[in-house]
Image: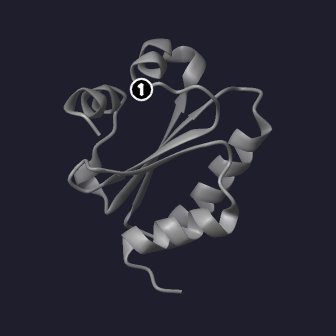
């Protein structure tokens, strides 16, 4: 992720240095897949202390949406402890894929 992109996320409250993996989700209010993804991430957070999560209402943060080229919701950014962009996804990730990604970066082996 570019320094400018990381700066945008930090303005939204992202603090990647505080977790092994930080997931930032851009959502809209009436998006069903967004709600399902948020619920799944919160479930994972309960058993993975190295996981941080930040939900961003895309409609309330249009400047950030434009700067980060968010074109659909949910859009998720996956950041390592050093702020490195580990991945990005658009649309609801499959639960098994999301779990595998989280586990790969939080040190959980299941």
Q: At 37% across and 66% down in the image, what residue appears? A: 50
Which residue is identified by label 1?
A: 68
Residue at horizontal 46 percent and vertical 85 percent from the top: 109
Label 1: which secondary element: loop
Outermost residue, bottom side: 110
- Disc 1 packing (10 Å; few <14; some 14–19; many ≥20): some
Q: Position of residue 4 (x, y in %)?
A: 24, 26
Q: In this rendering, is residue 79 above or below 108?
A: above
Q: Is residue 66 left or right of residue 37?
A: left
Q: Is residue 88 above or below residue 44?
A: above
Res 19 → quadrant: bottom left
Residue lying at the far top of the rendered structure: 63
Measuring from the top left, give residue 78's x and y in whole percent.
Answer: 42, 51
The figure's colour scheme reads one colour
Q: For the N terminus, which image quadrant?
A: top left
Q: Kindly identify the residue that appears in the image at 69 percent across and 40 percent down.
A: 34
């Amino acid at each position: 992720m570019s320094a400018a992109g990381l700066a945008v996320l930090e303005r939204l409250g992202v603090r990647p240095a505080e977790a092994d993996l930080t997931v930032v989700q851009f959502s809209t209010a009436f998006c069903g897949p967004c709600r399902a993804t948020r619920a799944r991430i919160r479930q994972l957070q309960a058993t993975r202390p190295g996981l941080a999560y930040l939900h961003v209402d895309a409609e309330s943060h249009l400047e950030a949406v434009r700067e980060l080229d968010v074109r659909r919701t949910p859009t998720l950014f996956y950041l390592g402890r050093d702020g490195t962009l580990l991945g990005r996804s658009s649309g609801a990730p499959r639960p098994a894929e999301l779990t595998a990604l989280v586990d790969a970066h939080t040190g959980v082996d299941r």
